[in-house]
Structure formats: C-alpha cells, structure tokens
Image: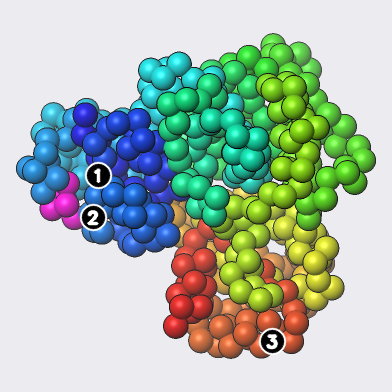
C-alpha cells in the first residue's frame, strides 16, 4: 500500500510516516518547507517533496498510484493535494485514523500520553526508559529525539506509546490500555469554544481509557464530581526529591512515568536510574549552544514551568517569546501576569499567525504584556539582526537565554547558529 502524507514535516505527521514505513508500507509525502523532521525522514529513505502546489502529489501518483492520502486538520479543504486526492478517488483520512488502524492490525496495547502540557516530554521519557531497559516498544512522539527516530514500529513490541493530542478532538479516536495525563489547562479555543467543552473532552477520554494516571489538581479542574472511569490521582505536593531531573514539572512528569512502569512492568525501581539519565527531547528546553535554549512552549503555564527549570540552572534568565495563534492569545491574554517573573529580561515578538479568525483583532505585544507584574522588563522586538545581537550579548555575559514559541522562532534561531 502506498501512503502519501501531506504536511509530512509536521510534529504529528512525520513520526506517523516513520511508523508506516517500519510497518511495511510504501511512504511518500510533501511539506511547504524543509525542516529537521523532513531531513530525518529523507535520511530514512522516505521520499519527501518540498512544495505543495499539486505537482508533487501528481508525480508520485503517476509513478506509483497512491492508495491512501493522510493529512492534518490544519489542511484547508481547497488545498491542491487534498483536491487532487478526492478527484482521483484516493482514500483520504486524518492521521489518527491511520494510526488507530495500525495499532489494531498489530494488536498493540496503547499507552497514551494526553494533556495540555507535558505530553512530548512524558512520551519521550517513557520511550527512553523502555529503550534503556531493553524492552521492545513502538511509539510516536511529536518532536525529534537524539536517541532514536520520532516514530517507530517494532514488530517485537507489546506496547505502543503515543503522544495523544487533544487538538481537533484527535485523542477521542482511541481506547488506550493506559493513559497518562501530566496536566490539564484550557487550550485550543478553535476546537473547544468553551472551557466546559474542553473539560468534557477529557472526561470522555478518561472514560475511554482502561486505566489512567494523573494528578488530583487536574481531577478537580475537570469539575465533574462523578467520572465514570478507572484512574489513580496523585497529590501534586508530594516530595519528589528522589528524582534528580531539572525542573519541577519534569519531575512530576517523571513520577507519572515511574508509576506507569510499576503498573505495566513491575520495574519502577529498576527503571529509576534510566529515568534520571533522560537526555530530553527536541524543542523541549533543548540546548542549542552555550547558554542558549529552544523550547516549544506557548502557554502561560508552560512559560512559568520552563522558566522555573531555567532558574535551577542560572540566576540570570532571559526570555525571547513568540506567542502562537492570535485566537489563542485572546483566550490567554489575562493569564499573562506572573508567568514571566523569573525572567530578568523579556523580548516579546509579534504573534505567529496560524488557523486564525479574520474577524479577531490581532493583539499586539504591548496589549498582551500590559498585565505582567514585570512588564518593565519587556522589550518589543522582531526576529531580526538586532535581536540576534542582543541574544549573543546575553549568552556571552553568562545569561541563560530561553527562546520559546511554536512558530518560526526555532527555525530562525537554528539558521543563525549555522551561519
């Protein structure tokens, strides 16, 4: 079967393409731009075309007829590749339909990591520990990993670890054997117009899981007294000093991983050294150079948590922040209060625009930062040479510079480092 992935460089699609290749399918795809993910896929022998004007999929289909066209929810209905697939009678589906079929076909037990924050790190940590223990595992993690591909199917595996995203209600396509939920905060207003609709989706996800592990604060946040689900909730104030990973949020994620391993394998103590040796994942407090880090975080809670981690490593932390989605900024604007107080200096960039409501006013950096307790530390900036000079100056002075955002900031940063 020939599967064509549109947007193959995306954090959800890319790992799935790797899994499909490992599972024996013929895989090809396209993306608008070259990226770390597309480079990784090409190295694995997957055919990747850069550009999506329709000619790429046409050439692939002519050379080897496409059986299944897989795409993300972000793809507009008039996209040239989607139009071509429909016109040529090619089966079309979003990514989760394909993954669910692979999991069923291979008779795998799904370990799903869901939640607003911490999905990628927790998924990556689970994969790392399985690998360190020598246990075969299949998985999909939404970023690059230094210790393996982003997605892999192992025919010897019993379990499939999946970073199970709630966007577009994707996670409701699955019935996990075990679910881990590191954190729940209201997000994705374009999918969930109200906080209640977001909470209801997680209640439904819990009910679809055979068993779940999460925190008591998140059970309380769901505001649903009687949840029809099997779960264990832990006190978030417990002593986690035995876990030596940096960052309070990462130690909490690691605790859930430890409890999951105990439930699955009865090997939590054997896995303890593996947990504490976790090297991290791409775009999650990833060190790019001396004193320079990149992070995917784009929610006030994520900003606060990552700054707390940074302050464990340095007393002088500088934040370069690119907000993500104007529609999301309207929702979280009033949460920009104390989330950046651990940063000595903040460079605030214009919001990266994606999947927007054209009727919404685009909020400026000045509007978004007006309620910060440390707003005197904010400098409105752009991705330009002046900002790069400031970043270099801070790094040379021994300051830890944290660049955060899910838009173009990471690509821009890496391009500067390679010059």
Q: Nearer the viewer, residue 191 or 126?
A: 126
Q: Nearer the viewer, residue 34 or 220?
A: 34
Q: Which span is picked out in magenta? A: 53-58
What label does residue 396 carry, if any? 3
User: To which quarter of the image does residue 131 belong?
Assistant: top right
Residue 345: x, y in percent? Answer: 74, 77
* Residue drawn at the location 57% of the way across and 83% of the way down: 387
Question: Mark 3 or mark 1, which is nearer the start of the sequence?
Answer: 1
What label does residue 28 carry, if any? 1
Say which element carries label 1: strand
Q: Are marks 1 and 2 in contact (CB under 8 Å)?
A: yes
**Circle 2 is placed at which residue position?**
49
Distance (Cα) linking label 1 and label 3: 43 Å
* Residue drawn at the location 76% of the way across and 33% of the way down: 270
Q: Nearer the viewer, residue 382 or 98?
A: 98
* Residue drawn at the location 92% of the way across and 40% of the way down: 239
Residue 253: x, y in percent? Answer: 73, 41
What label does residue 339 carry, if any? none
* Res 80 seen here: yes
Principal secondary structure, stretch drawn in magenta: helix
């Amino acid at each position: 079967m020939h599967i064509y992935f549109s947007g193959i460089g995306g954090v959800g699609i890319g790992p799935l393409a790797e899994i499909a290749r490992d599972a024996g399918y013929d895989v090809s795809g396209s993306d608008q731009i070259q990226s770390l993910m597309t480079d990784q896929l090409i190295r694995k022998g997957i055919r990747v075309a850069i550009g999506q004007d329709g000619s790429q999929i046409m050439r692939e289909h002519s050379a080897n007829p496409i059986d299944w066209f897989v795409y993300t929810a972000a793809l507009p209905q008039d996209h040239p590749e989607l139009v071509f697939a429909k016109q040529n009678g090619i089966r079309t589906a979003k990514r989760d339909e394909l993954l669910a079929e692979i999991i069923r076909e291979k008779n795998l037990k799904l370990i799903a990591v869901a939640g607003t924050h911490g999905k990628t790190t927790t998924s990556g940590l689970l994969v790392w520990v399985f690998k360190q223990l020598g246990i075969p595992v299949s998985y999909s993690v939404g970023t690059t990993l230094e210790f393996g591909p982003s997605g892999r199917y192992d025919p010897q595996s019993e379990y499939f670890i999946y970073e199970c995203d709630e966007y577009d209600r994707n996670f409701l396509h699955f019935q996990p054997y075990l679910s881990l939920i590191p954190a729940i905060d209201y997000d994705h207003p374009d999918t969930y117009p109200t906080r209640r609709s977001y909470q209801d989706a997680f209640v439904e996800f819990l009910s679809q899981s055979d068993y779940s592990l999460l925190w008591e604060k998140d059970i309380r946040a769901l505001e649903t007294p009687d949840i029809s689900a099997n779960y264990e909730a832990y006190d978030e104030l417990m002593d986690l000093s035995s876990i030596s990973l940096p960052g309070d949020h990462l130690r909490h994620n690691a605790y859930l991983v430890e409890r999951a391993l105990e439930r699955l394998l009865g090997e939590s103590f054997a896995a303890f050294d593996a947990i504490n040796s976790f090297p991290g994942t791409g775009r999650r407090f990833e060190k790019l150079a001396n004193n320079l880090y990149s992070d995917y975080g784009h929610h006030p809670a994520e900003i606060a948590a990552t700054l707390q981690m940074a302050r464990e490593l340095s007393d002088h932390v500088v934040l370069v922040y690119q907000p993500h989605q104007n529609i999301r900024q309207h929702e979280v604007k009033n949460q920009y209060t104390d989330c950046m107080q651990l940063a000595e200096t903040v460079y605030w960039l214009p919001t990266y625009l994606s999947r927007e409501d054209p009727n919404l006013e685009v909020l400026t950096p000045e509007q978004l930062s007006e309620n910060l307790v440390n707003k005197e530390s904010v400098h409105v900036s752009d991705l330009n040479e002046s900002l790069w000079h400031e970043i270099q100056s801070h790094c040379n002075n021994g300051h830890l510079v944290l660049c955060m955002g899910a838009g173009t900031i990471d690509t821009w940063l890496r391009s500067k480092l390679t010059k």
